[in-house]
Image: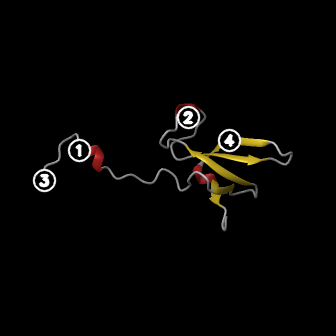
Amino acid sequence: MIFTNKLLPLLKITKPMSEFATGDKVRIKSANAEMTVVRVVGSEGSDELVFVKKRGYETGDVICEWTDSEERKRIDVFKNSSLELVKGK
């Protein structure tokens, strides 16, 4: 079989974008506060990539939502490597 230059990008094998998915319960490795992943940066339908890249984040990092100690809803971006999955959730 002969591959053309147009097909080569389709054959490229890439690593998974993130080890987390929307809806996963996660926490920062150094803390106990539980958060919910609301979006993976760069995922399909995601338009925040340019904004978060300016802040030092990249494709595969995650946007999480949680409630703080004063019951206020919070949302922020986290490096994929700084989080761990909450077991049993």
Label 3 or label 1, whichever comes before in sequence order: 3
**Label 3 amino acid?**
Met
- List the residue tagged with mark 1: 7
Q: Secondary structure at mark 1?
A: loop
Label number found at residue 1: 3
Residue lying at 73% horizontally and 48% vertically, measured from the top left: 66
Label number found at residue 43: none
Label number found at residue 48: 2
**Label 1 amino acid?**
Leu
- List the residue tagged with mark 4: 76
Q: Is the C-beta separation of discs 2 and 1 under 8 Å?
A: no
Q: Residue furthest bottom?
A: 88
Placement of 25 over or under 46, stated as above or below: below
The spot of residue 69 in percent (x, y) is 85, 48
Q: Secondary structure at mark 4?
A: strand
The spot of residue 37 in percent (x, y) is 63, 50
Q: How many marks?
A: 4
Residue 23 versus residue 51: which sits nearer the camera?
23
Label 4 or label 2, whichever comes before in sequence order: 2
Q: Is the C-beta separation of discs 3 and 2 under 8 Å?
A: no
